Image (tube, rainbow, N blue to C red):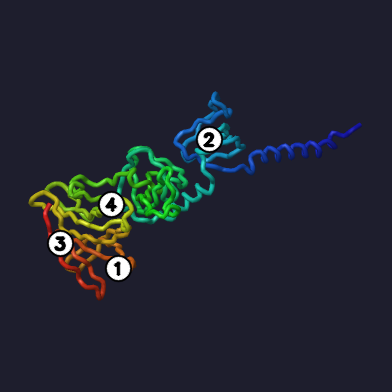
Amino acid sequence: MKLPGRKLPTLLLCLLLLAACSRGRHRGHEVAYVSAGLVVLRDRVAPVYTKTGTVKNGDKVEILERDRRFARVRTSDGAEGWIEERHLVTQQVYDGFQKLAADAKDDPVQAAAITRNETNLHLTPGRDTDHLYQLPQGSRVSILKRATAEKALPGAPRSDESGAAPVLEDWWLIRDAQDHVGWVLARLVDVDVPLDIAQYAEGQRIVAAFVLDQVQDGDKQVPQYLELLSEPKDGMPFDYNQIRVFTWNVKRHRYETAYRERNLNGVLPVTIAKENFDKEGMLPVFVLRVKDDSGNIVERKYKLNTPIVRRVLAPGEQPAKPVRKSHR
C-alpha cells in the first residue's frame, strides 16, 4: 500500500513550477509609454480587426512581441492588443521627461500662454526630437525658458552639411496643468497678455508680462506691469531686448509708460519681488539678467515707486542715462 503523503513533495514541486512559470510570463518585458492622444488596441495586425481595448497619452504598457511596425502590448488593467510602434516611446524617454520636470521644479514662471492647437511636448528643442505628452488646443501653460533650434526644411540638407546659415526657430520650455514639462514650438502658443497693455506692442513680440503691484482706483484694484519685448522674428541671440513698465494714472484712469529701455541683451528668467527701501517703504523690484559686451551675464535691479522707475545700483556701479517718460 502506497502512502498518500509520498505524493506531497511531487505535488508541491509541480505547484511551485507552475507559479514560477506564471510569474515568468509577466517578468522581463520591455516597458513603453503611449505618446498619442487615444489609440485603439487591435486583436491582430490586419486591415480588419477587433478592438480589444484603448490606451491614452502617457499610459504605461508592457511590450509582449513585435511584428513589423506594430507591437503587442499589455496595459495595467490586463488588456492586450496590437498598436503601431510610432505611438510608443521608451522608458528612457519617459525618464528624460521626469528629470526635465524635476530640474525645472523651482524655475520662476515667465509668462502665461495658451496653445493654438494640439501640441506635442518635446524632450529637447527641435521638431524631430522625442516627444511624449500632448496638449489639447486651448491648454493654459506656464512659460519657463526660451531656446532656439534649427528648422528642418523638407528635402534640404542640414546647415552643417550645406554650409548655409541655419534657419532657427524659437522654442519655449513650458509646464502644463498636470506639471508635465517639455519644449514646444513657440509659434504654437500665444503669450497671454492683457489687451490694455498688449495694444502698445508697436509691432514687437511680447515675450512676457509681470504684475509688479496694484493701485487702488475707486472700488477696483488695477495691476501695474513690467513687459518684455523682442524683435518680431525667431532665432534672435537674446530672449528680449526691450522692457516697458506700465503704471496706472488714477486721475485719467489709463495706463502710461513709466519707463522704457531698449538695446538690452536680455536673458530669462526675470525675477519679481518686494524690498524695503527705508523712507520709501516696501517697493516692487524686478531683476533683469543681461549679457554685457564680453558675453557675461550680469544682474540689473530696478525699483518702482509709482510712477517712477529707478535702477538700484550695486556698489561702484555708475547710474544710467535718464529715460524720458512717455504717455500712452
Q: Secondary structure at mark 3?
A: strand
The residue at which mark 4 appears reads as 207
Q: Secondary structure at mark 1?
A: loop
The residue at which mark 2 appears reads as 84
The residue at which mark 1 appears reads as 293
Q: Outermost residue toward the bottom?
A: 316
- Mark 1 → mark 4, Cα distance in angstroms: 23 Å
The residue at which mark 3 appears reads as 308
Report if the CB atoms under discs 3 and 4 are less than 8 Å apart. Answer: no
**Residue 73, visible in the rendered structure:** no
Q: Position of residue 114 (x, y in %)?
A: 31, 43
The earlier-in-sequence mark between 2 and 1 is: 2
Q: Secondary structure at mark 2?
A: strand
- Mark 3 → mark 2, Cα distance in angstroms: 61 Å
User: Would you call the spot at circle 2 few (<14 residues within 10 Å), some (14-19), or many (20 or more)?
Assistant: some
Residue at 17% over, 66% down: 280
Labels 3, 1: front one? 1
